[in-house]
Amino acid sequence: MLGTVTGMTTEPAAFADWASARTLSEHIAVLARALSTRSLGCESVPVQAALGRVLASDLRAPLSLPAFDNSQMDGFALASAQTPGRFTVEGMIPAGAGADASRSPSVSSPSSSLPLVVPIMTGAPVPPGADAVVPVEETEGFDAPSITVDAVEAGRFVRPAGSDIEVGETALPADTVLHPAALGLVSALGLTEVRVRRRPRVLLVTGGDEVVAPGGELRAGQIFDANTTLLRAVLAESGAQEAGSLTVDDTVDDFRTALARAVRECAPDLILTSGGISAGRFEVVRQAFAPGAQVGEGVTADEGIDAQVGFGSVAMQPGGPQGVGVVHAADAVIPVVCFPGNPVSTWTSAQLLLRRAFKDAWGVGRPLPQVQAMLTEDIPSLPGKTQVRRVRLSQEGAQLQVRALPGTSSHLLARAVDANAFLLVPAGRGTIPAGEELTAVVLQEE
Ligand SMILES: Nc1nc2c(c(=O)[nH]1)N[C@H]1C(S)=C(S)[C@@H](COP(=O)(O)OP(=O)(O)OC[C@H]3O[C@@H](n4cnc5c(N)ncnc54)[C@H](O)[C@@H]3O)O[C@H]1N2
Ligand code: MOO
């Protein structure tokens, strides 16, 4: 249901053209277009700091794995062609014996009347002439001067050089999200750094006279700021990082002044705002980004911000009011994304819209996975907009089932925290009956 975008431009485009409500996919495409005005580039990071980062280009193996034929078992290396029979035991090849391999006896040039076997440990290089290994349990043991061996096929318990990956092959393709096994492979290949996409640095902006930082003192009518923390956490899960955060009151001049200064100080790749964008008299974000808005007092025109931000609606609930565009500030073009202030609206917007746009525009992060799940009860739909219900997904036998949590309003954050998925209830379907399958977006695998 949520789409991807192709054919993006790197030029700032006209974002103000937003007459009718957009679908989620249409809006994701516009978000990605705004983000694409800024190029992130790549950086090298130490392997130990690369978990979750996105590989910038194909990583080719600088060596083969295994680098040499080696034993898969503790046992005896031998020439399979000489089996079955009795063998003299000679020498010892521990793992790591490569430097001394010339001192290992060659099984093809025996020093006794019997053919030779050489004790060999798991991971040790197979000596010249040997092509198979017999596990010690199948013999008289390591202390015996000679052992009897049944017929053995060539290659038994030998791990050939390059059987995992050959030198020059692609070990990890570009865009791999580096997970623990991928990082293990990077180290197995002897590399200490990886080239990854740079993480977007995001300036978080919350506005409103009523919003107070947690730990502060609430006056009548005020609330604690939930959204900065919530967005910071979504960013951390989405391959982005916080460049700074700003809490501003409802004074438009103060907002523009503070924003211009913060942009100069932290040079963000994205300005992400929450609140202040709908239809009220004190919509500080919307007013501050309005075409022709005055630059704040104490800030010269050169230091100010010149905004091309469009505001309109996306046919979803919660998360209907949205804004997107770019600002020109501090000699740079910086994308701007504006979310509605209700905490569940901000959360839904970040998870469903921004994560996908990060991936489409910058190739970073991981959009949340989508699954089909069966309704366990009738679910009402809304005319003209997708409703995003907070739900519990559970696996019942072969069937993924979904149970809606109570409450659809966007202030119900406490009721939403138990959700492990969002259910996308399609627009205009009346009451959708139990038993039908709908798309759910998975928040947490459990
Ligand atoms: N006449 C109309 N009124 C509203 C409409 C509309 O279409 N016409 N849309 C409603 C919808 S839907 C939403 S969503 C909100 C969006 O409003 P804003 O983006 O302007 O956000 P605010 O008015 O600033 O705040 C909304 C709500 O959220 C609280 N809030 C704001 N910031 C935070 C924060 N950082 N942490 C916690 N809570 C926050 C704020 O106190 C408000 O209660 O508009 C509807 N109105
Ligand atoms: O669209 Mo608003 O986000 O429902 O509360």
Image (cartoon, rainbow, N blue to C red):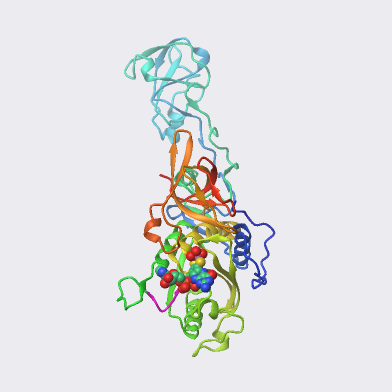
Horizontal side, residue 414 vs residue 384: left or right: left
Say how many tags the image has: 0
Q: Residue at x 42, y 68 (%)?
A: 228
Relative image position of residue 210 (x, y in whole percent): 39, 76
Relative image position of residue 130 (x, y in whole percent): 50, 22
Q: Residue at x 62, y 54 (%)?
A: 3
Q: Residue at x 53, y 32 (%)?
A: 161
Q: In this view of the protein, can residue 297 be seen by the observer?
A: yes
The quadrant in which residue 95 appears is top left
Does the magenta-highlighted stretch encompass residue 207?
A: yes
Horizontal side, residue 11 vs residue 283: left or right: right
- In front of the other: 336 or 312: 312
- In front of the other: 6 or 26: 26
In the displayed structure, 332 sits above or below 113; it is: below
Q: Residue furthest top?
A: 85
Assign the C terminus to one quadrant of the image. top left
Horizontal side, residue 235 vs residue 311: left or right: left
What main secondary structure does the magenta stretch of the protein show?
Answer: strand
In the displayed structure, 199 sits above or below 299; it is: above
- In front of the other: 104 or 246: 246
The quadrant in which residue 85 appears is top left
Relative image position of residue 414 (x, y in whole percent): 36, 59
Q: In this view of the protein, can residue 275 be seen by the observer?
A: no
Q: Which residues are magenta?
A: 204-211
Does the magenta-highlighted stretch encompass residue 410?
A: no
In the displayed structure, 262 sits above or below 123; it is: below
Relative image position of residue 264 (x, y in whole percent): 50, 78
Q: Residue furthest right?
A: 7
